[in-house]
Image (cartoon, grey):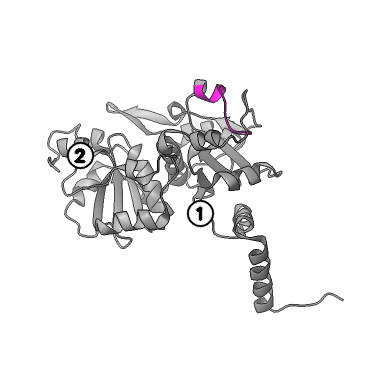
Amino acid sequence: MMRKFTRRQLLQGASAALALWGLKGARLLAQEGALEQSPLISADELEALLSQTLPSLRLIDFRDQNTYLSGHLPQALPLWQTAITVTVDGVPGLVAPPETVNDAFSRLGLDGESQIVVYGDSASIWAARLFWVLDYYGHSNVRLLDGGFPYWKAQGRPLALGVVAPAAGHFEAVPQPQKLVEADWVLAHLDDPTVVFVDARDAEAYAKGHLPGALSQPSKENTLDTEQFKSVDELKARFESAGITPDKTVISYCQLGVLGAQNYFVFRLLGYPDVRLYDGSFADWASVASRPVETGA
């Protein structure tokens, strides 16, 4: 006869099991959708996942093709930004329309059930850009490898050569308009006290010209020398001390939406409920002479 348990007993049993298994076990359960997961995944967690048979796992190497061919993580699929970006009115690097993204991601074997992990180099700025593209197009089950390829390689973890060629998938992009802003929206909200604009470029670029009222928060300050992200407590203290708090609508931008995507990722990591990327960023803003620009620190 099968014994019946109350909901409380089941929860107590699950808690005890997780305590025995430890944090790593809990995070692996998160990969299967049992627990809420962080958008950041450690090298230890990823290596453990790669040792399992997870048909839905897709690891994406977001570096250029030649760099990928010189060595990549096991099972990693190659993708570079040229496949998912377009130039509009002279502004390069904008997110491609759904049909282009659908084609690129479907060729990687992605679909709505895919558990996606992305990585890159250069302090994960490009990987964060890919994270935002997936997030914007409605795929919430995506994580970013902490430290990216440089940290993985520096630790002597497994690498592979050659091109991984998956079976085609069926990715359907569903734009999330609350995760992107364009120039007209920015112009209409420059004086909105509930909105804060965050400039991810370095101090020199910010001083030469930025959105009126924008706060300078260079993306390079998010990471350590190992290219890993600083602790959640450090990152939270950094932004909140500047007045960038979770009760605000946070608009992240830079020059072309790449450094800004890294700040976007950090705000998502911190659990900010309303963070958006100005995709065209300052290149788009400054392309129209009548738009206001501030200078100075």
Is residue 112 among what the camera can see? no
Start-end of magenta stretch: 67-75
Q: Is residue 45 left or right of residue 231?
A: right
* Residue 206 tag number: 2
Q: Read off the residue under disc 1.
A: 38
Q: Residue at x 65, y 74 (%)?
A: 12
Q: Please say if 259 is above or below 18.
A: above
Residue type, numbered disc 1: Ser
- Which quarter of the picture shows residue 165? top right
The disc, 2 or 1, on the residue closer to the chain's N-terminal end is 1
Q: Secondary structure at mark 1?
A: loop
- Whether residue 105 is in magenta: the answer is no
Q: Nearer the viewer, residue 212 or 96?
A: 212
Q: Residue at x 35, y 57 (%)?
A: 236
Q: Position of residue 54 (x, y in %)?
A: 68, 45
Count of labels in the image: 2
Q: Residue at x 54, y 33 (%)?
A: 153
Q: Is residue 107 left or right of residue 81?
A: right
- Which quarter of the picture shows residue 207? top left
The residues bearing labels 2 and 1 have C-alpha atoms spaced at a distance of 31 Å
Q: Outermost residue toward the right?
A: 1
Decide whether the magenta segment is chiefly helix, strand or loop.
loop
Q: Position of residue 80 (x, y in %)?
A: 47, 28
Residue type, numbered disc 2: Tyr
Q: Nearer the viewer, residue 30 or 177?
A: 30
